[in-house]
Image (spheres, helix red, strand yellow):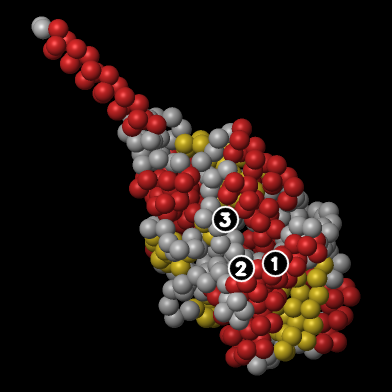
Amino acid sequence: MSRALAVLGVALLVLAAVAAIAETGSGKSGDSTPIRVGILHSETGSLAVSEIPVIDSTLMAIDELNAQGGINGRKIQVFQLNGQSDEAVFARDARTLIERDKVNVIFGCWTSSCRKTLKPIVEQDKNLLMYPLQYEGLEESPNIVYLGAAPNQQIIPAVKWFLDNRGKRFFLVGSDYIFPHAANAIIKDYLRLYGGKAVGEAYVPLGGENFASIAREIKRARPDVILNTVNGASNIGLFGALRGAGIKASQTPVVSFSIAEQEVQEIGARALAGNYAVWNYFASVDNPENRAFIKSFQARFGQGCLTDDPVEAAYIGVELWAQAVRDAGTPSPMNVLEKIGDENYRAPEGMVYVDDQNHHLWKTTRIGQIRSDGQFKVVWTSETILHPEPFPASRTEGQWLALLHHFDTKWHGWSGPAVSTNVMGANRCRLM
């Protein structure tokens, strides 16, 4: 062999090695290292009853992907921390997941105050948060995918439907943090627009349980409908106080934006029957995808374990993220974010699409009435899948941002004082 051929052969080997290294670094074929992901939800505290099933659903979706060989030949490795229903803990743990554990995505948060606490963290570190909850809107982030309803996919349709069907007088009750205050600002705008009236508005600290005086105030105000943005275990106190005041669902229904099948199961279906909730998904939705989803969930966690909107949103969040990782050829957050706006998925709730402009989902809206068996009878479904509009048209984006600034300045954060409280009860699915 001539010297020139020998040099050429060595050069080709070097080029091949460099190409292999580059391909491995990009996350394509040849890289078998696990993809590192974070799960950050509350396993303790007042929000645990709602968040534990979301953790379960997220883990189920990840396990199903791993059983299929992972993504692009790489298994998924989970790093899980407990946010403890505390925004400060969530912020600390998010930094731990990103900086110590080097995760490529965080599946997490429940309250809007938690999400707003993590927003600057994932933006600064160029990471990705998959957020599974419906929320008040008034926000967009290039580093967050919003898997739940925007205001025009939950809050605004509810105002219109109950004005048309139950009366014009509304009482607003919520927990004292950003979601209820912002949601009620939207509600009052649209009540004025549609000819309704807010006859009262009251808040309790997040985690608070004493609603006796609020129940008396509601009874004096004689509303046609109560709109409820109370979150977590505090709903036990709210509905107990309403029963104690003689306020019945048949006369004055409560319409909840944060109570789903899981909370109904924990509070008690008989205590809640006849009241309403507004979501994109109910377990009673009848289609092949939902039947398969419920079957898999209950096979894993037990027949007594219920799916609900945040549980389903968390599951499809994993699926949408996995599709974007495949399309990007790498789990790198910024590369995934470049692709995720192209993704869609036939979910248990129906088809969903990620909006390529605001990273919210196109979704169908449903209003359900609580039955005595703990499920929901769907009484209204939007005629079409709804494009997400984070900033309602009743005010300019600048006016909405000014309102958020007012609350941030008032509270020095995103919530008023919280109180400690017990969890509703041990999550029965975790006991299986």
User: Of the residues tagged 1 and 3, which is closer to the observer?
Assistant: 1
Q: Quadrant of residue 24?
A: top left
Residue ID at (44%, 41%): 331
Within 10 Å of the Cα at label 2, are there few (<14), some (14-19), or many (20+) other Cα atoms?
many
Q: Percent position (x, y) of residue 420?
A: 83, 54
Counting residues from the start of the chain, the first of labels 1 and 3 encountered is: 3
Which quadrant does the C terminus fall into? top right
* Residue at image coords 79%, 89%: 222
Tell me the quarter of the picture where residue 22 sits: top left
**Considering the numbered disc 1 on the image, is that residue within a helix, a strand or a loop?**
helix
Q: Amino acid at mark 1?
A: Leu
Q: Position of residue 68 (x, y in %)?
A: 38, 41
Q: Amino acid at mark 3?
A: Tyr
Q: Is residue 194 left or right of residue 58?
A: right
Q: How many badges with numbers are in the image?
A: 3
Residue type, numbered disc 2: Leu
Horizontal relation, residue 355 to residue 167: left or right: left
Which tag, 2 or 1, sits closer to the chain's start? Answer: 2
- Residue 417 in the image: state x and y as whole percent: 83, 59
Q: Decide which of 10, 52 is in the foreground and name it.
A: 10
Label at residue 131: 3
Q: Name the N-terminal-most of marks 3 and 2.
A: 3
The extreme left residue here reads 1
Picture layout, residue 319 above or below residue 66? below
Mark 2–mark 1 contact, CB under 8 Å?
yes
Residue on which disc 1 sits: 404
